[in-house]
Image (spheres, grey):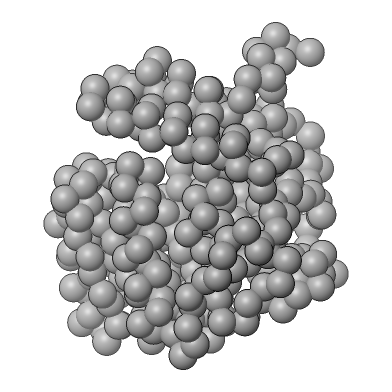
């Protein structure tokens, strides 16, 4: 076994992220303040995750960094409460650049403990993801757990933001609305949208990856085509989902409540059962490569197999 592969496979995901941010901050354009904020945020979050009995046994996807098998199977995280509430939203989360961290599904289950949460993995990020894969994942979750995914909301983060718009535009009637976090669309892409479901654009005004003026131009284009857009601008940078997690999810929950026909108020989290798993139910084609922060990913290549 490759020594680096063995090391990555045996060092906890949180520790790897904290170390990688410190080592690679300059390379990836992080200021010293941002690097410290991210290290503190990940450190505290993974400590809380490790102390969460519902997270016991939750497997990292870091080994996928070294995936080379051309028939390697697909991956998604899923959280299913013991008794999923029909009133609670089903959340379909598309991760950003850097891979599908455990942090995302943990943070979502803390915020929405009565919701079914599905987080499919697509390579290094969902910016080039095939939205048909989303349908496959949802069907597989329904089959594996014997549930029906209703009241679905799409949530896209950073590089997952444009993919979320593609998901909505392809089958808008399947979803209640879209939450776009720290992301945006060009005016050209925004002009291609045609769905009427509500959109929440949640952005930091100090974001250099998706500058606020770029985001505003895209929103103006959407509105000129009659799309229903609500914009919330925070005095934050690109990483507010980590550094201001509670505030961010409060805004999102209020938006969902406003646009839902049923209440999404959640009872005690202790009544939920953690069923987060590393599921590999079907074959896809992958090529694995090392990436930023040593986060696991699978780069999809070639033609993909379909579920029957």
Q: Quadrant of the C terminus?
A: bottom right
Position of 199 compared to 139: left or right? left
Residue 61 as seen in the image, left or right of residue 200: right
213 with respect to 268 (left or right): left
Q: Which of 269/288 is in front?
A: 269
Q: Is residue 54 in view from this perspective?
A: yes
Q: Position of residue 96 (x, y in %)?
A: 45, 47
The residue furthest right is: 308
Residue 92 in view in this figure: no
Instruction: List x then y, in percent, for residue 124.
Output: 53, 40
What residue lies at 66% left-to-right and 62% top-to-bottom?
Answer: 272
Q: Quadrant of residue 190?
A: bottom left
Q: Residue at x 81, y 43 (%)?
A: 71
The residue sitting at the bottom extreme is: 261
Left or right, 225 with respect to 82, comes to left
Q: Looking at the picture, tell me which residue is in the foreground, 246 or 9.
A: 246
Q: Position of residue 224 (x, y in %)?
A: 20, 82
């Amino acid at each position: 076994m490759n020594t680096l592969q063995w090391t990555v496979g045996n060092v906890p995901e949180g520790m790897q992220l904290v170390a990688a941010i410190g080592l690679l901050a300059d390379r990836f354009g992080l200021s010293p303040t941002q690097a410290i904020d991210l290290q503190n945020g990940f450190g505290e979050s993974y400590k809380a995750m490790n102390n969460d009995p519902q997270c016991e046994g939750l497997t990292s996807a870091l080994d996928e960094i070294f995936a080379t098998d051309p028939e390697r199977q697909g991956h998604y995280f899923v959280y299913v409460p013991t008794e999923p509430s029909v009133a609670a939203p089903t959340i379909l989360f598309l991760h950003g650049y850097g891979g599908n961290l455990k942090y995302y599904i943990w943070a979502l289950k803390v915020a929405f403990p009565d919701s079914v949460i599905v987080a499919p993995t697509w390579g290094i990020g969902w910016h080039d993801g095939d939205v048909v894969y989303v349908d496959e994942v949802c069907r597989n979750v329904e089959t594996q757990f014997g549930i029906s995914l209703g009241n679905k909301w799409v949530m896209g983060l950073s590089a997952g933001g444009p993919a979320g718009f593609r998901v909505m535009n392809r089958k808008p009637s399947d979803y209640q609305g879209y939450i776009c976090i720290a992301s945006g669309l060009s005016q050209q892409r925004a002009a291609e949208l045609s769905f009427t479901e509500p959109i929440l654009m949640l952005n930091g005004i100090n974001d250099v990856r998706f500058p606020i003026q770029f985001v505003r131009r895209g929103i103006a284009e959407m509105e000129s085509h009659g799309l229903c857009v609500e914009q919330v601008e925070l005095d934050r940078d690109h990483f507010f989902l980590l550094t201001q997690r509670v505030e961010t999810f409060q805004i999102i929950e209020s938006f969902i409540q406003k646009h839902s026909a049923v209440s999404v108020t959640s009872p005690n989290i202790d009544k939920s059962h953690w069923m987060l798993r590393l599921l590999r139910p079907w074959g896809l084609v992958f090529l694995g490569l090392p990436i930023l922060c040593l986060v696991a990913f699978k780069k999809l290549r070639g033609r993909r197999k379909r579920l029957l």
